Image (cartoon, coloured by chain):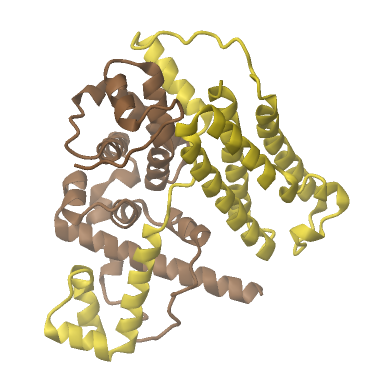
Amino acid sequence: MTCADFQRVLPYIIETGGKAEEERHLRECPICSDLVQDLRYIAEQAKLLVPMEDPSPRVWNGIKGSLEREGMIKPARARGRLLGPIPWMAALGAMILVSFGAFLVERGRQQQPGAQLDEQPPVVRAVSLNTIATEQDDEQLLQHVAAARPASSRAYESNLKQVNASIAEAKKTLQQDPDDGDARQSLHRAYGQKAMIYEMATRSLP
Amino acid sequence: MIQQKKTIASGLSEAEAIERAKQGDAEAFEGLYVLHKRRVYSLCLRMTGNTAEAEDLTQEAFLQLYRKIASFRGESAFSTWLHRLAVNVVLMRLRKKGLPQVSLEETLEPQQEDGPRKDIGTRDNVLAGSIDRINLERAIERLPPGYRMAFVLHDIEGYEHNEIAEMLGCSIGNSKSQLHKARMKLRDLLKTSRAEKAVQR
């Protein structure tokens, strides 16, 4: 059996295994063996891809608007308050976005390819990613949630953990390659998500 | 079927929220949206590769959910049911638009890549250990639409070939073939990206 023969049937046997002849070729041919190893590795890695992004708030606004227009739900009563009794959460949520925006602007001005995040001048460090919503802030948020809505505590904890992991991963990629636009976008999105978690807490806690 | 007990921000369990949403409770429905929006949006985004389109489809999927939730009987997990609904919304939209990404002929017909590969007899370093999430996501975005659909549905979302064949209106063999081509293309893209990075360093 040649490599071409093997690779022609590969799509149909990769998951189930092939006939004895095909299995023998796979054992003996390093090229086809490498190929199968790669394809299986890609499939394994794909299974680990978890949903990372939330849709923008306008999606929910659109859904709500459509349902209201169709008369399926009544228009929501206007909320009497914006910040509620724990304004620091809303403030911090907003700060996350504003600070990250400032960070992006400053990074754009600096235009220093190859510069590491930790080597930024003080003006940038002041709004650097490490100073936005610290672990302590997260803990404080979780404590508030646990006290007011214990049932939601685990969901908030898991969401924060996930978004913090995304931030860490994107930051790591950016440290290796500061010009990586995709990583920068991922980081931006992750901070947006984090801000939304704080915003949700602000709105849903009594 | 045993369902994992999920809790939504309002303190309701998922099952309670579903029951209330069936009665038209908008807050319970919003809770279901909060719980599932990320997964539905990611699915739409990965299948279309377009943020605006994905947001629009997410909106459409949840509107359909609101209209159809009364028909959810709990025969499968709610997330599975919702997911299938979302996939159908995406496929329906793509077919309606008649854009290249919906053309099953384009995606399912044999292409040049069906033939023996040029590098069939060469050996390169294996990928193991060299893929990170960002690179893989980026490579998936660059897949031709038909390949991307088969890959997203099978390898990311976990659908079986018979389910994909039914959804896409093709044979199981075609689904397997599309998936294989998608993985091969991804392998090329990932190796190219790795080589480019190595040159830059």
- Residue B114, by quadrant, is bottom left
- Residue B26, x across and y down, in percent: 38, 17
* Furthest residue toward right: A122
A78 or A151: nearer the viewer = A151
Q: What residue is at 35 percent from the left and 11 percent from the top?
A: A70
Instruction: State which quarter of the image contains the N terminus of chain A.
Output: bottom left
Q: Which chain is yellow?
A: A
Count of picture labels: 0
Instruction: State which quarter of the image contains the C terminus of chain A.
Output: top right
Is B15 positioned to the left or the right of A112 in the image?
left
Write down the colour of chain B.
brown
A20 or B144: nearer the viewer = A20
Is B143 positioned to the left or the right of A94 in the image?
left
- Residue A142, x across and y down, in percent: 58, 38
- Residue A109, x across and y down, in percent: 81, 48
* Furthest residue toward left: A19
Question: Up-down: is B142 above or below B99?
Answer: below
Question: Up-down: is A49 above or below B66?
Answer: below
Question: Up-down: is A33 above or below A198?
Answer: below
Q: What residue is at 25 percent from the left and 37 percent from the top?
A: B81
Q: What residue is at 50 percent from the left and 64 percent from the top?
A: B132
